[in-house]
Image (cartoon, coloured by chain):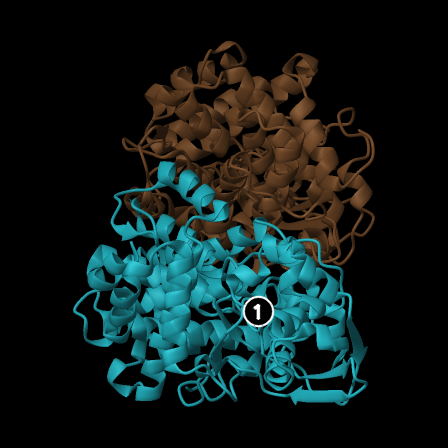
Chain colours: A brown, B cyan
Amino acid sequence: MGEGFAGEVLGRFVAESCWEDMPSALRHEAKRSLLNNLGCGLGVAKDPAVTSALAVMRNFSGAPVATVIGQRVKLDPMAAAFVNAIACNLLDYDDTHLATVIHPTAPVAPALLALAEQRGFSGAAVLHAFLLGGEVECRIGNAVSPGHYARGWHITSTCGTFGAAAGCAKLLGLSAEQTWHALGIAASQAAGLVENLPTAAKNVGVGNAPRNGMLAALLAEQGYKAAPAAIEGPLGFAHATGDTLDLAQITEGLGTQWEIARNTYKPYPAGIVFHAVIDACLALREEVGAAPEVIASVTVAGDALLLARGDRAVNNERDARVSIHHSAALGLVRGRAGVADFEMPAVTDPMLASFRAKVRAVLDESLPRGAATVTLRLADGRDIQRTVVYPRGSFERPMSDAELEQKFRDNAAIGGFADRSEAGIAGVWGLGEAPDVSGLMRALA
Amino acid sequence: MGEGFAGEVLGRFVAESCWEDMPSALRHEAKRSLLNNLGCGLGVAKDPAVTSALAVMRNFSGAPVATVIGQRVKLDPMAAAFVNAIACNLLDYDDTHLATVIHPTAPVAPALLALAEQRGFSGAAVLHAFLLGGEVECRIGNAVSPGHYARGWHITSTCGTFGAAAGCAKLLGLSAEQTWHALGIAASQAAGLVENLPTAAKNVGVGNAPRNGMLAALLAEQGYKAAPAAIEGPLGFAHATGDTLDLAQITEGLGTQWEIARNTYKPYPAGIVFHAVIDACLALREEVGAAPEVIASVTVAGDALLLARGDRAVNNERDARVSIHHSAALGLVRGRAGVADFEMPAVTDPMLASFRAKVRAVLDESLPRGAATVTLRLADGRDIQRTVVYPRGSFERPMSDAELEQKFRDNAAIGGFADRSEAGIAGVWGLGEAPDVSGLMRALA
């Protein structure tokens, strides 16, 4: 993509990109990302974190032209994007760019859909802007990882602001230079802290990414400018937030190697490192049958990250989503790990609680990140074992389109929108040919 | 103020504070801060940076109940606070808390005035909330200084977000615990980069401080929570943004030693370290008269910061505001240093340009920060010298109320609002007794 400041190269890339040049696999991945993301939003439409955000934003919204997922009211695009991003990411059941642990879609897509609803942009324009925004977001994320997150920055919120700015700039038809400025303005708005992840304050960072990224693009459209090196300058975003930088990752291979193509979708609403544990336990249950009483004990082996994150007591829903013990119990006792299986009735279910006590976590440094080996000691003294290196939903073993459709249906049903599922699914798959997004958004309202 | 998390102590301090307990000097300082700040906003009401921000926000504003300074239209409180903060800080002619270089009023007061206009809060409630918000802002700033700014964080924008959240929490009558959460939510919204300071992207950070600080308080009112240690936790605001921390400064002496009482106001719209240069040159002009031709050369001595910031070529308005040479030329040639004296006609004025060439900057490490010694070599061979340690407007030599009134009048006249000056001045001085802020805001519309 040539030489220049990081924002300059990205601005040119975004402004000059043509939908016609997007490989069809990439276009399809954009739809898969949206399908996965919008279903997550439908599932939590009645959650207090969503309805409280909506209650605040209703008093600070211009003309109500943008759909709020699963709600009767509409808001202006900035306010709608705020609430929708919160909803779509709320349970961390959305997507993952594993190299950065960014959830790419929630900070970007809500801004694009809302802006498109206001201004009548086509479905293809939204998909294109999403790919570009997601690409910018993940590449800046790569450049500042892992020091950025380790220092306390919630990378989905911070890098998501850039992604939303880039995507909105594309939708608005900004020039390469205006897009460069939009990215620089986004740099002065990027925020969100890991310390706040266990609380609703996390949602505010995620919601602000599309809200403020959109503002960055709108201000750049009005002539607002930013520093040329707002991203990589000595007092710019990357140095201020990161300790170990690899700035070349922002631009190397841009337009030929797509980071957003590495997006993955979760079959289970649990921390991504627990997916191998669940998969191994589901497979072992196939062997031993639905008979947890024949299992004397369970040993889960994994790398240091798995143990650091997941070897914990389970007192609430949040614990459950990042627990080795709960993950194993669900796989072996219930034979499933859906949204309801991480909610309070499951946390306090005596059968799950007593089974969790049979589970022990041990370190196995030979296992790669994200892998797990589960060993069952049966009542008759036999041991049976299963290792999963690439769990369902990983890049190497992706969820199929049909599985993503079913996840959408399941989420819609949880939110009370089962009757909308097929229209929503059809709306996403048909988005590339839709003259505008109104059909899709009607299905989500 | 007792023990606890930083946000907990601050939340209790804000929630439990009584207007009746505020010392009268502090109440008066709140009015001085407002008078100084609002005048700055009037002066730049027609600046494109302000009108562009207004143009964007008009499309993303709820019920127009809050005044935008110097504009016919109103906006919702969040949008109005965004535009007003940009205006009041635009030229950096507003106030300075020297220890942190925070401009305390712009990120805080616009949120409070707008919220008060919407909900009918009294003038005293606004003044009280301003003192508390400003105090929180400067104390958090002290705790992360100087590493925070040195790392690239525009401290007015970042710490201003906390100040606005605290002030809005007080106005809204939030409990101590809710205020603690509001501060934690603010932590996930604090952003703004030094790299962007020479551009309009700086304004976005400043405008977001009251916009997002208000949002933090409104979300806390709705039950949103944050991490207990969002400010000082290992992955919280202070550690993420600062390298050298002194966290005790957040709470030590809280309620007895007021940081906001150390606020200062600028007599000249130039970088604060140039004020001593201007003062020394004005004094020397009294001696030699309005006859720059008798001055053969000028030597300005100052500390390393003065030289690092100010020894530069002057090509535009921004250069002029941080130039030793331009500051000296104004003092000696024009005998004044007002807003117009830093604009392009002054930059390109041949008499000033040729005089700037006579000025030389030298290091004098014996001088304290903010001080300057100016030596004139006259045409007849004589040297005359003047040292200024505490310039006009410094904490040690503050602008008088009458001077602040005159600054307000001058700014109002620059903005084309000379006819509003006396109503605005009276509105600020009478704010403590006003049942609401409508009279003051009418004078500023």
Indicate whether A43 appears above or below B381.
above
Q: Position of residue A43 (x, y in %)?
A: 40, 34
Q: Nearer the viewer, residue A239 or B285?
A: B285
Q: Position of residue B85 (x, y in %)?
A: 43, 57
Q: Position of residue B10 (x, y in %)?
A: 42, 76
Q: Nearer the viewer, residue B252 or B427?
A: B427
Q: Position of residue A213 (x, y in %)?
A: 53, 40
Q: Amino acid at mark 1?
A: Gly
Q: Residue at x 47, y 53 (%)?
A: B208
Residue B166 is at least partly visible in this image: no
User: Where on the picture, by quarter, is residue A32?
Assistant: top right
User: Where on the picture, by quarter, is residue A41?
Assistant: top left
Q: Nearer the viewer, residue A26 or A302?
A: A26
Indicate whether B179 appears above or below A261.
below
Q: Is residue B9 left or right of residue B73?
A: right
Task: Kindly identify which residue carries mark 1.
Answer: B233
Q: Nearer the viewer, residue B263 or A127?
A: B263
Residue A396 is at least partly visible in this image: yes
* Quarter placement of the N terminus of chain B: bottom left
Chain bearing mark 1: B
Q: Is residue B75 left or right of residue A398?
A: left
User: Where on the picture, by quarter, is residue A135?
Assistant: top right
The mark total stands at 1
Q: Residue furthest front?
A: B380
Indicate whether B79 appears above or below B396.
above
